[in-house]
Every structure is written in structure tokens, then in C-alpha cells.
Image (tube, helix red, strand yellow):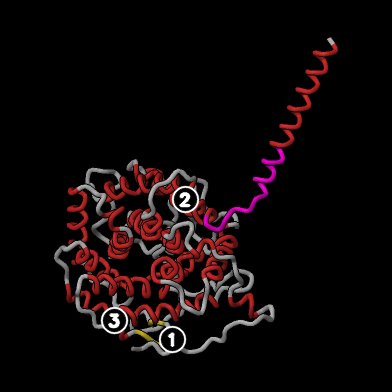
Amino acid sequence: MKTISWKFSIIVICLVCNVNVFSQKTKNAEQRPVSDRTYWVNLLYKISEPVLSNMSKGELKKNMLMEYSPTWDGRNKDVAYMEAFGRLMAGVAPWLNLPDDDTPEGKQRKQIREWALAGYVHAVNPDNPDYLLWNGSGQVLVDAAYIANSFIRAPKVLWESLDPITKERYIKEFKALRKIRPAYNNWLLFRAMIEVFLASIDEEYDGYVLDVSVRKMNEWYLGDGWYSDGPEYSLDYYNGYVMHPMFVEIIEVMDRKKINSPVKFDLALRRMQRYNQLMERLVSPEASFPAVGRSMTYRMGAFQTLALSAWKYGLPKTMTNGQVRNALTCVMKRMFSVADNFNKEGYLQLGFVGHQPELADYYTNNGSLYITSLVFLPLGLPADHPFWTSPAEEWTSQKAWSSKPFPRDYHESVKQ
């Protein structure tokens, strides 16, 4: 009996020790900091899931909890669904280029890709409940351009994976948009983006539109990294939302397809890199940035140029991967740690940080807000890329306001 009791005591002690060890491991796992990349992936998944999971089933229009500006101008409200899908996919596209793997990220990426491909099919199928609004409001031109941009950013995974009927439907819808007269401002780039996508797949394209759009943007260049949005300058983030990225990518495709461009790719890129230098300096030591201008509810979309350069072209020589990644991550965390960025169904809500519907412009709905996804372009880089593996570094304003050495800023002439 004593022998049995002694053995039982040993078993109990071992079990208690194992429980304690497991509890400590669990506690350590909970305390272990999440990597920047994991944070980015989880946030992008959180933003994408409600839109793409519903779109994949043809239930986005049925289930999306919508919100429109208090000063909504009366245009067809159905445009909101194209805004949500097109803008989101322009940001998600590079990430979906990466190959599948069995990591938690890989499983999330595979799921998003499957949902997205089904959504692309439904978007142009007239018999599907989620057939998007391809006719009507001029706003359609804007968000069709973001869909075209998503194909340009991930042609093999997104465009070439589509069936022939779906491809033909997109080509037909894109060409039908030629009847829309774009506004005399950044909208010229939306028209050009659609035409350059058609050129990229060897379809008939309107070369005159490409030439005029590039020439006008060049005429509207003010200097030191800034374009005017049409003949009149406005202080806002449209250089980041639209002008620099689309201008650079349009000219890049024109060069690849040997379409003559009145502006060289190198010049357009150098202008964007100068703008990147200024945008990085706008991140305050506390990881905020100025809430100025139109469309401030587009949140992190303001930093699309930094994201695009990090993913595709390389950052300016004056800044490092660790510096830019740290700045963007800290701004994301400050912005999205605030309550009420998302509604009860998980969709984005009107606001800059949290829920602030009074900030929405007359053309803004919560579908518009998915342009914030454009900051996630660096997820198209593999996890072992220096952008993700470099140690976090202080960004410029942190150094400046803590009396540390930092590079002097200066005007850079990139007119030609």
C-alpha cells in the first residue's frame, strides 16, 4: 500500500510540474511580441475578410453594413460596393503574389486569394447579386481603375487565373467606360490606368488618352515632389492616394509595352521618391500625421507612395527599411488601436481615427475607406526581405525631437 501511495505521489507531482511548465509556456507565448509583419497581416486580414468573404458568396450587397456621408450628394449608392472591392484589391494584390505555404500567414493569404478570385468573377457577372455598378455615376471610372490597377500589380495570380468568359466581361466593361468624361484633375489617371491595363494584355487601347494624361500630369508638376490636382493646387494627400503611384505605374507599363511616353519613367519615379522623403518627415515623434485636406477618412492610404516604393522600386537612399517599416507600423497601431474604426459587422466606419462621420466628404461612404489597404503593398515582399528583417529604427522626426543627428532636408529639382 505504501509503494502504491509513493508511486501515486510521484505521478501527481509530475502532473503538477507539467501543468506549471505548460502555464509558463502559455504565459511566455502571450507575452512574446508580435512581429511587425504578423501585425500587418492580421490587420489586413481583419479589414479584408468581411468584404471578400461575402463577395465570394455573392452576398456583399446583402450583408455589408453601409454608412454614407451626412452630406451625401445623392449619387447612386450602389457605387459603394465597387469602391470597397476595387480599392481593397489594389492594396491586397501584391501579397497574393506570394506562393502558398503552411504558415498561419500562408493560410490566411490562400483564403483571401480564393475569396478574391470568386469576387472578381461575381463582379462582372450580370446574373450574380454582387454584379457591380458598371454603368451610371462617373465615380465608376475611379474604382474600375483600382480594379485594373490590382490586375497590373498581380497579373499572373489575379488576371491570368480568371476564366475566359470573366476576362471578356472585364474587357467589355472597361471599354464601355470610355463614354465617361473624366474630371480635369487626377481623374485623367483613372482613364489612363484602364487603357494601360488593356495595353498590358495586348488589347486595343486608346493611345491618345495615355498621351494626354501623362502630358497634363507633367504640366501640373509644381516641383519638389508635388503635383497640383488639376490647374488649382490643394493641400491634401491626393499625391499619395492617386497621382504619384498611378503616374509611375502607367508610365512603367507604357515603357514595357514600348508605347511612347512624353515623360520618362525615371523622372516620374524620382519625383515620387522626393515626395516619399517629405511624407516620412510628416510622421510625428508620437506616430501621428496631419489630418489635412479632402478625403482624410482614407486613413493609411496617404502613405501609398512609401508602400509602393518599399515593395517595388526601393526606398530613397536617405531612409532605411527599418526606419520606414517602424514609422508605418507605429502609425497603424496608433490609428487602429482606437475603438470604433470598425462597425459591429467588421466593416470600416467613417472617420480618420475611430468613428467620426462628420469628417466624410459629400462623395464618401464606408466603401471608399478601403483605400487604406494601399499601405499594405510591402506584404508583397517575402518575410525574409530586409524590409521585414531589418531592426526597427527611429524615423526622422523622432531623431529631430530627441536632439539626435538627422539628415538635413533640402529642395530637390526633379522637373526634368
Q: What kind of residue is marked 1?
A: Asp
From this viewpoint, is residue 224 visible? yes
- Residue at left offset 40%, top offset 49%: 51
For the point 22% across and 65% down, which residue is it? 200
Q: Quadrant of residue 118?
A: top left
Query: Gap between marks 3 and 2, in whole Å?
Result: 36 Å
The residues tagged by marks 1 and 3 sit, at their Cα atoms, a distance apart of 17 Å
Q: Measure how far apart labels 2 and 1 are at the Cα level.
A: 36 Å
Q: Which residue is mark 1?
A: 224
Secondary structure mostly taken by the magenta-highlighted segment of the chain: helix
Is 27 a magenta residue?
yes
Q: Looking at the picture, does residue 258 appear above or below residue 86?
A: below
Residue occupied by mark 2: 45
Percent across and percent down for residue 238 are 41, 73
Graded by Cα atoms within 10 Å as few (under 14), some (14 to 19) or many (20 or more), the crowding at tag 3 reads some
Local SS, label 3: loop
Mark sitting on residue 264: 3
The magenta-colored residue range is 23-37
Label 1 or label 3, whichever lies nearer to me, is 3
Q: Position of residue 395 (x, y in %)?
A: 58, 73
In front: 48, or 185? 48
Dot 1: what SS? loop
**Which callout, 3 or 2, points at the residue further toward the start of the chain?**
2
Residues packed near mark 2 inside 10 Å, few (<14), some (14 to 19) or many (20 plus): some
